[in-house]
Amino acid sequence: MRLDPRHLEILAAIVDAGGLTEGAAKLGKSQPSVSRSIAFLEERVGQQLFEPRRRPLRPTELCLSLAAEGRKILDAGRAASALVQTFKSGEAGTVRVAGTPIFMDGVISGVIAEFQADHPNIRIDQSYAYIDEALEKLKQDQLDLAILPVRPGALPAEFEFRQILKGCNVIACRVDHPLTQHAEMTARDVIDYAWIAPPANSPLFQDMRALLESIGQRELKIGFTGGSLSAVLNVLAGSDSLTILPYSVVVTLQRRNQVASLPIEIGDPGRHLGIIINRSRSLHQAAIRFESFVGERIKGMSRSMASD
């Protein structure tokens, strides 16, 4: 036997409110419509649900049992409404974001942790991608946004770039590296050391090559190639190798005493960190909330770095 869930909801409201009129008011319905619903339900179950000729209404045992089920339906409806509201307000949902491994691990992961401390019901699905892959995923609606270093004007018109941090790279090494003891230093001082190279398709690899070519070193002396920040840090810590990293990443690591940077001017990389979205798709509220949070945190970091 299938019963109409709406009739069970009405029955629960009547029992809880103590009468037909009160139950109707609780549900925002008219008393005659509520009476008809109860009559339909009684016909369906084949029994009276309230003891006849008793005022106030006295529910039967079956009525109380059915009302308990109707109460579950009412509670589920309220929970569902609350859930919808949290999604509409941006307090729940899933945000799909991608970026380069170095930036995501060195900077953005900490921002994600801060964000989730304030918004625990928002799930962040984070992945790694360089520019071509990230744009394709944005186009296919497999990402909500990407956080990448980009040259101004380099994106197709269908994408919007919102800059959050000016690009700046530095040469990084272990804290007690021999070069950190030099009173004065020039770019030529780095020639004799091996380098940790980012993946060949990464923007940092292009920057490293440009730096070494600018000091006349055509052949790269690469001792290790790794895409993850943790791998780079492990090799740095146990060797005299050098690498090139975004200044924002190095500042974060220096505060933990994990790396040092060398005072060598290496020029502007021409790329700036920003958030990329697909103009043809509107961000849902959780993604809007996350984008705003990341932008404010990174801009705050930029102000802090400028004052150091």
Image (cartoon, rainbow, N blue to C red):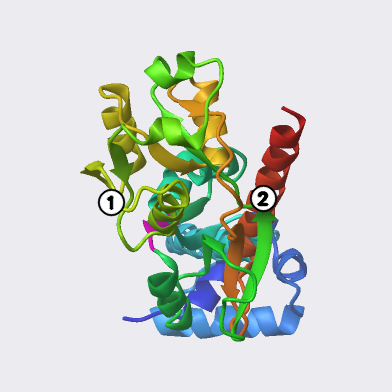
Q: Residue furthest front?
A: 216
The image shows residue 161 at horizontal and vertical percentages of 64, 70
First in sequence: mark 1 vs mark 2: 1
Q: Amino acid at mark 1?
A: Glu
In the image, what residue occupies the spot 64% across and 76% down? 153
- Between 295 and 188, the one nearer to me in the picture: 188
Q: Which mark is residue 219?
A: 1
Task: Report which residue position mark 2 lands on.
Answer: 293
Residue sitting nearer the eye, 212 or 27: 212
Q: Residue at x 56, y 84 (%)?
A: 156
The stretch drawn in magenta includes residue 185: no
Q: Is residue 232 above or below residue 167?
A: above
Q: Which region of the structure is painted magenta?
A: 125-129
Image position, residue 284 (x, y; %): 61, 70
| Vertical order, 43 against 180 (above or below) | below
Helix or strand or loop: what does disc 1 sit on?
loop
Horizontal relation, residue 143 to residue 91: left or right: left
